[in-house]
Image (spheres, rainbow, N blue to C red):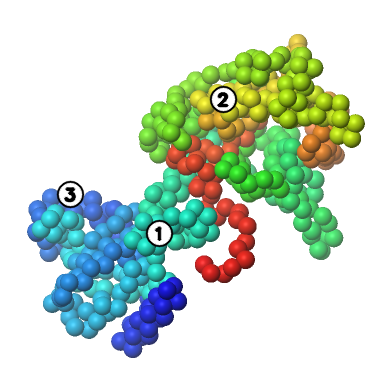
């Protein structure tokens, strides 16, 4: 059936050419947004059944509805802002243009000139006096313009998803607005936007597996960055006291509703600050975005009600582990027994490498606590062994001056009071944790350490996940709903 539609539309394309019409159009300047046209008609105050001969407009978009009734036709044309009804009369268009109207299909892109009015039922309508074919669509749109119903197909055919589902278009407009607002907020706070390398000879700044590549000219293995942290800190050394980057990171790990191997973060560093300043930035970023896109501080996400009103609660890692796992952070035997009972580690297995205490503890925290952190919450005082780039808590070096921000059970931000002692930094990087997956942090960046030896001011550092932030503020259940082209496994068939 799909081939039959294609063949039928191809014949119409040839018929258009026979009529002297270019089926792929040309420049069509002066187009007004459908939303603006509709707003203008509202301002005119036209009554039902009336037309304003002086109220002209030029519109363009994709046909999403088509009704031909004898010598009268009604089309609904969709652009990125709204739908607009188009009225066409053979008496006005003339015989030649009417032949073109009869060759139009759903999905075709057209341009129109005409007079503004309302039908007898009050529908805002552009009564066309001219029509230009801008692109003939050879494939039919999703049935009845209800959008793509197959979730996997939606991600694979995002172009179709966007033009057939206005709510999807609005989600990505909101995402774009969120990034614009974050950039404006950070610049307003005196931060300088910078760019750091995505191709790195030494990866670092996070516990993650990198993607690898090779530069032929230099005969050099390189990594796609897992974090910009170590380069941004070099800028602190250089005297850039407040820097931020809205960056793409790449981690060669799993895919889920919360993870995509390629993702976007806003990472910033503030000289002479600490993690309390970073908390204020997180709250400020969320507040600014909420005010920009609307919806209020109390908003739904996955059928739960979230309250983003600042200040957000502060809870320590220790008290949360006690509350939800029933163990004390300092009682590692109890922690290991609890973790083993949940299948997170093995007790005394001779062939299984023993995971460090901090790794086991954090696996238990992830399994028992993180899913319970529904309302926006800052979790503070992580085990220091998990945080090699972080300053220790005065009076208790077993804890790090770090927080993670959680909403709806997802981590959406990670921040430190940054470590700037080069000797301790070297010691931490040299003695990284062992265990499942943690070999990825066993990387020594001598150039970064050399920079620290020149002196880095005390600082606070923060990373905020843009994709997850967009999920929360647009009520999108999956990270793939807010990434235009998420990574998908290639299809064996080319039937799309």
Residue under label 3, please give it: 43
Element at label 3: helix
> Residue 106, image x and y in percent?
33, 68
Residue under the point 73% across and 25% down: 341
Residue under the point 51% across and 32% down: 285
Mark 2 or mark 1: name the one nearer the start of the chain: 1
Depth check, front residue: 233 or 142: 142
Disc 1 vs disc 3: which is toward the camera?
A: 1
Question: Looking at the image, can residue 32 be seen?
Answer: yes
Residue under the point 61% across and 27% down: 370
Q: Quadrant of the N terminus?
A: bottom left
Mark 1 or mark 3: name the one nearer the start of the chain: 3
Residue under label 2, please give it: 372
Quick check: 229 left or right of 313?
A: right
Near mark 3 (Cα within 10 A), the count class, few <14, some 14-19 or many ≥20, is few
> Residue 270, image x and y in percent?
64, 30
Disc 3/disc 2 C-alpha distance (Å): 50 Å
């Amino acid at each position: 059936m799909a081939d039959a539609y294609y063949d039928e539309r191809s014949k119409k394309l040839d018929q258009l050419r026979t009529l002297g019409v270019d089926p792929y159009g040309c420049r069509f300047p002066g187009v007004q947004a459908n939303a603006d046209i509709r707003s203008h008609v509202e301002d005119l105050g036209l009554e039902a059944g009336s037309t304003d001969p002086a109220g002209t407009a030029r519109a363009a978009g994709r046909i999403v509805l088509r009704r031909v009734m004898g010598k009268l036709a009604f089309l609904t044309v969709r652009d990125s802002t709204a739908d607009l009804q188009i009225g066409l009369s053979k008496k006005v268009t003339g015989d030649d243009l009417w032949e073109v109207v009869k060759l139009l299909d759903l999905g075709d892109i057209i341009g129109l000139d005409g007079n503004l009015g309302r039908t007898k039922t009050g529908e805002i309508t552009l009564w066309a006096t001219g029509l230009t074919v801008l692109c003939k669509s050879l494939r039919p749109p999703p049935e009845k313009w209800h959008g793509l119903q197959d979730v996997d197909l939606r991600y694979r055919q995002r172009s179709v998803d966007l033009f057939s589902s206005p709510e999807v278009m609005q989600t990505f407009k909101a995402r774009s607005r969120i990034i614009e607002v974050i950039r404006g907020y950070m610049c307003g706070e005196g931060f300088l936007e910078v760019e750091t390398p995505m191709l790195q000879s030494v990866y670092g700044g996070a516990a993650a597996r990198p993607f690898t590549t090779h530069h032929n000219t230099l005969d050099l293995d390189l990594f796609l960055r897992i974090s910009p942290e170590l380069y941004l800190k070099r800028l602190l050394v250089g005297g850039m006291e407040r820097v931020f980057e809205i960056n793409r990171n790449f981690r060669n790990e799993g895919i889920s509703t919360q993870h995509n191997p390629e993702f976007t973060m806003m990472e910033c560093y503030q000289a002479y600050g600490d993690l309390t300043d970073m908390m204020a930035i997180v709250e400020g970023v969320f507040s600014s975005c909420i005010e920009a896109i609307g919806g209020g501080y109390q908003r739904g996400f996955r059928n739960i009600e979230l309250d983003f009103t600042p200040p957000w609660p502060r809870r320590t890692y220790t008290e949360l582990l006690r509350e939800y796992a029933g163990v004390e952070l300092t009682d590692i035997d109890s922690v290991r027994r609890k973790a083993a009972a949940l299948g997170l580690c093995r007790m005394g297995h001779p062939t299984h490498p023993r995971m460090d205490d901090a790794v086991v503890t954090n696996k238990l925290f992830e399994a028992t606590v993180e899913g319970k952190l529904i309302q926006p919450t800052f979790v503070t005082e992580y085990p220091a062994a998990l945080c090699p780039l972080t300053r220790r808590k005065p009076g208790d070096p077993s804890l790090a001056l770090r927080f993670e921000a959680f909403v709806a059970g997802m981590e959406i931000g990670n921040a430190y009071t940054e470590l700037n002692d080069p000797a301790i930094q070297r010691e931490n990087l040299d003695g990284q944790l062992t265990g499942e997956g943690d070999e990825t942090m066993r990387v020594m960046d001598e150039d970064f350490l050399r920079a620290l030896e020149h002196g880095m001011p005390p600082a606070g550092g923060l990373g905020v996940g843009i994709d997850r932030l967009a999920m929360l503020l647009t009520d999108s259940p999956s990270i793939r709903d807010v990434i235009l082209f998420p990574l998908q496994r290639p299809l064996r068939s080319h039937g799309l």
